[in-house]
Image: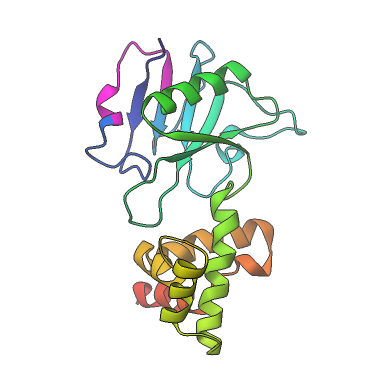
């Protein structure tokens, strides 16, 4: 049986206060999970897991010639801004990550009722790289007067079957959060689709006043 010890500093986006996952921490565990705390290598453990923001796992472990990888993995539970965390966990691996560490991490999260997808070590992983350009496009369409927020949201709900539309989703998650995620992606990839939309820049500037 795989058990885990949690080392935490500050709040966790994946496991906020009261999440039952936090209550299962054990001092004699064979896996260590770092939530906002500096990690330490330990090759005696089945896996060492580091909670990520938009950054790459390599920021914490270092990289070398594309051969990086060990029992240290990254993870981030998808969460739309301040919404309740979803059941989707993105598990981040490197080129030479230990397969047994990946299996152990997947089992721990799956046993907690989460759906696990494995991602290569890319800033933003899978979901944010897919959805943030769509949110940016919707915000730009709103600025350009191509459609109202209500029309875009209604079209996505009725026409595409989405539970919510892009404008209501990004506003509910927080425009500042959207700015911070897209700015991080834009700095890494330099792709115009990731550049923070005007409304996100405005929200960030207002918060800094």
Residue 175 makes an appearance in the image: no
Q: Quadrant of the N terminus?
A: top left
Tell me, yes or no, whether the highlighted magenta stretch contains residue 118: no
Q: Is residue 120 left or right of residue 21?
A: right
Q: What colouring style does the render use? A: rainbow
Residue at position x 37%, y 65% from top?
Answer: 174
Residue lying at the far right in this picture: please name it.
65
Q: Is residue 122 left or right of residue 14?
A: right
Q: Is residue 116 left or right of residue 65?
A: left
Which quadrant would residue 209 be assigned to in this image?
bottom left
Residue lying at the far bottom in this picture: please name it.
145
**Considering only vertical position in the picture, is 86 above or below 93?**
below
**152, 123: nearer the viewer:** 152
Residue 139 makes an appearance in the image: yes
**Considering only vertical position in the picture, is 23 above or below 89?**
above
Residue at position x 44%, y 67% from top?
Answer: 157
**15, 183: nearer the viewer:** 15
Residue at position x 55%, y 80% from top?
Answer: 140
Tell me, yes or no, whether the highlighted magenta stretch contains residue 27: yes
Residue at position x 35%, y 72% from top?
Answer: 207
Residues rendered magenta in the picture: 21-32
Residue 15: give x, y in percent of width and height. Answer: 33, 39
**Considering only vertical position in the picture, is 10 above or below 137?**
above
Residue 17: give x, y in percent of width and height. Answer: 24, 40
Residue 83: give x, y in percent of width and height. Answer: 33, 55
Residue 48: give x, y in percent of width and height. Answer: 49, 23
Which quadrant would residue 134 be assigned to in this image?
bottom right
Which quadrant would residue 34 be assigned to in this image?
top left
**Considering only vertical position in the picture, is 61 above or below 156?**
above
């Amino acid at each position: 049986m795989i058990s885990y010890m949690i080392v935490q500093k500050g709040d966790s986006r994946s496991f906020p206060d009261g999440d039952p996952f936090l209550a299962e921490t054990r001092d004699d565990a064979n896996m260590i999970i770092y939530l906002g705390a500096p990690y330490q290598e330990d090759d005696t453990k089945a896996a060492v897991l580091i909670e990520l923001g938009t950054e790459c796992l390599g920021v914490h472990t270092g990289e070398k010639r594309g051969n990086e990888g060990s029992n240290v993995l990254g993870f981030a539970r998808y969460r739309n801004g301040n919404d309740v965390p979803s059941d989707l966990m993105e598990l981040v691996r490197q080129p030479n990550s230990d397969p047994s560490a990946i299996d152990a991490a997947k089992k721990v999260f799956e046993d907690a009722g989460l759906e696990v997808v494995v991602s290569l070590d890319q800033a933003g992983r899978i979901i944010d790289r897919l959805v943030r350009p769509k949110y940016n496009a919707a915000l730009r369409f709103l600025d350009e007067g191509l459609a109202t927020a209500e029309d875009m949201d209604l079209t996505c709900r009725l026409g595409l079957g989405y539970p919510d539309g892009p404008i209501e989703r990004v506003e509910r998650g927080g425009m500042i959060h959207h700015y911070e995620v897209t700015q991080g992606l834009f700095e890494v990839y330099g792709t115009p689709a990731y550049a923070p939309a005007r409304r996100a820049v405005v929200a960030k500037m207002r918060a800094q006043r």
